[in-house]
Amino acid sequence: MRFIYRLAALVAGIVVLTVSLGLGVNAQVITVPGDITVECGGSIAPEATGIATASDGCNSDPISVESSDDLSGLSECGNTGTITRTWIATDGCSTSITDVQVITVEDNTPPSIACPADMSLACGENPPAVDINAVSAVDDCSGSNVTVAFVDDQVSVNGTMVSTLRTYSATDECGNVATCVQVFEADCTGELFISDPCTCGNPNNYQLGGLNYIAELATIGSGAGETWTFDASAFGIYDSNGNPMTSGTAVEVMPGIYEFPFWVLNSTPYQIALSNGTDVAQYAGFDGDCVCDGAFYDGSVYVDTDGNGSQSSDENGLAGVTVSLMSAGADGVVGTADDVMVDSTTTSVVGEFNLLVPAPGSDYYLNFSGIPDASYPTLSAAGNTGLLNIGSDGGTAGATPAVLDCASLILDATVVCGSDDAFFTVVVNVVNGQAPYTVSDGFTGFFGSNSFILGPLPNGSSYGFTVTDNAGCAASSDSGGQVDCATVAVDLVSFDGIVQETANQLKWSTASETTDRFLLERSDDANNFQVIATVTAVGSESQGSNYTYVDANAPQRGVTYYRLSEVDLNGQVHVISSVIELRRDVDAVKIDYVAPIPASSELNIGLTGPEGSSAVVTVFNIVGQNVYQTIETLRENGSQVQVDVSELPVGVYILQISNGEFQAVKEFVVTD
C-alpha cells in the first residue's frame, strides 16, 4: 500500500490532511482510528493517533482520504480539551463517506522546577530572604505561565549540623504542582546554638504575671563524656517556674552532643553560656526581634474514663490532636461561616497544648480534629467548645475532656516477605489508638508511635497477637493460616537506577507477572523504607513489561537506597528486589562484597573508602536493634573485615558501614 499525506501546522481553526491511497478501491466503507487520549506536549499527528482507511470495489481509481480538525474544544487549562477529527473518503465516482475520531488532550504532568543552589551558612546566621524570582519553572502545556510560590522553611538539627529546608512550589494552569527544596546548612561543631529559636507555638511556653516565657533549647557539640554546666556570664535566663536560673547541667543526648533547656522573656535580650571547666560557650539571644504578643492559653485533651469532666491522675492525655483557636471573621460574630483560625498546634505526648491568644479579653473557641473516633461530652457535633473569654493572664475554664471509644481501635497488618522468601515480617499500623502500646506474646520492635514490626518469622508459619493501648483498649489480629512467601507473582528480570542531574531514575523489567501493583520504596539508611510510588502492573502471566519511574524528590546529597516490592492479588506484599544504592558524593564508603550468603560462622566484608578514614561497622537485626559494632580503617584500594556471626540467631540482618557523613548498607542472612 502506498499513501501520501499533507498536514498543516496546528493552529486554532481547521487543519486539513489529505491522504492518497493507490489501492483501486472506493469510499463506500471507511475505518477510522479509535478515540485516543494524548498527554499535552505529545504528538497529535496521524502517525501517532492513527490514519483512516477506506475501500470500495467500484473502480480502480485512487481513493482520497482527508481529515479536518476542529480545535475549538481546546478551551481548557493549558490548551487542553478535545480535538474533533473528521475523516472524509472520496472515490473516483465522487462518492464520499465520513466518520469522526475524538482526540483528548490532557495535562497530568507537573511543571519542571529548579530551586536556587544550596548554601552554607555560619552558625547562627539566618538564611537570606525568600526570592521566588530565583526559582525557574516551565511547563510543557502552560509554558512559562507557571505560578511560583514560597511554601515554608523547616529547621532540622542533626547533631551539630543545623539545616533549613526551604520549599518552593510551581503550579501550572491545570493545577499540577511540583516542588523543590533549597538547603541552607550550618556546621555548629564546637559552638553553642539555639534549636528553632523564638517559637511562639512551643507547647512548653507559659505565661506568669502577665509575662510570656518562651521555651528555648541550647545545643553544643564537643567531646564525648564532658560536663557542661550553666555559667555565671549568662543573663536573662529563667526556669520553668519563672525563676532566674543560677545553675544547671546540660544533658548529653548522644556522644558529644549536649542540650540545655531554658526560658526567656518575650522581646527581651539574653545571653546563654555553658562551661566545661576549661572553655565557655556563649550565645547572644534576640534583641527585641522575637515578639509573642498576647496571652498563652494552655490546656489538655485526655481520656475522661470516669466521665466526671476533670482529669484525674490515672487518665491519659491524647497525643497528636490538632487544636485550633478560632475567632470571629469579617462579620464580627463568633460561630459563623467566616470564622478565622488565629493559632493552631498539636497536643504533646501527654495531651497538653499551648496557644497564643493575640487579643486577650475577646471571645474565642477551640476546634479539635484528629481525636480517634471519640465522643465529646462538652463539645458540639462540629468539634468546637463553647465561647472562651480568655483573660490577659491566659486563664479560663479547665481542660477539655474527650471519651475514647475502644471499638475504634483497628490493627492494619501487612505481611512483607523477605527478598529470599525464607522469612517474612508483619508490619502493623495501629489506627485510632493511644500510644504507648503493649503486644502479647512478648513481641516488641516499635519503630514509630503507632507502628511496629512482628518477626522475622519463617515462611510457612502463622502468627497471632493482641495489642493493648495506653487507654486500656485492645484489638487482635492473626494470619488466618500459614503464610506463603515461596509463591511470588512476579518474575523480575532487572531492577536498577540512574542518577540524573536533579532526580533519580528507577527502571525495572519483568518476564511475567500476575500481580496487582508494584511498590517503589526509598530509604536513607537501607533499614527503614518508605513507599514513594505505587505503579499499576500492566503485564500478564505470559508477558512481562518494562517500567520507569523518576524520583524527582530524591535527596540531592549523599546515598539513597531503593527496593521494589509487589502486592499480589491477595494483598500480600513481597520484596522482590535486592537493595540498590544511588550516590551523589565521591567520598562515600562502599561495600564491595559480602560473603558467604547465607553465613553461619564468619562473614567476610570487602570495603572501599577514603584512604585512612575511619568507619563504623554495624549489624542490625530486622527490627532495627544493634547486635554488633566495630570501627575499621578504610583503604582506597579496598580492605576486608571479618565479623563473627556464629552467635547470632537465624534471620535476616542489615550491615551498615558509616564514616560519619556517608554510609552503605547490605542485607545478609544467617543460618545454622
Image (tube, rainbow, N blue to C red):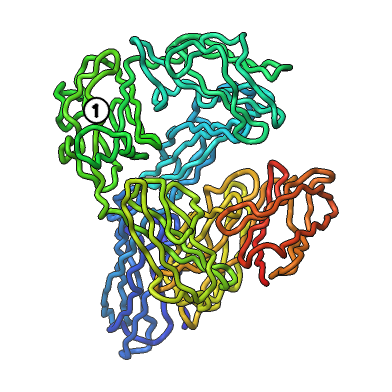
Q: How many marks?
A: 1
The quadrant holding residue 115 is: top right
User: Looking at this view, is 240 or 518 the one in front?
Assistant: 240
Q: Secondary structure at mark 1?
A: strand
Relative placement, left or right, of 25 versus 670 is left
Place of residue 58 in the rendered image (x, y in percent of width and height, measured from the top left): 30, 90
Relative placement, left or right, of 663 versus 194 is right
Callout 1 amino acid: Met
Q: Residue at x 78, y 62 (%)?
A: 604
Question: Where 16 falls versus 489 (above or below)?
Answer: above
Question: Where 44 falls versus 364 (above or below)?
Answer: below
Place of residue 357 in the rendered image (x, y in percent of width and height, measured from the top left): 30, 20
User: Looking at this view, is 439 or 154 the one in front?
Assistant: 439
Place of residue 345 in the rendered image (x, y in percent of width and height, measured from the top left): 35, 32
User: Looking at this view, is 558 or 14 the one in front?
Assistant: 558
Q: Which residue is mark 1?
A: 326
Place of residue 591 in the rendered image (x, y in percent of width and height, measured from the top left): 73, 57
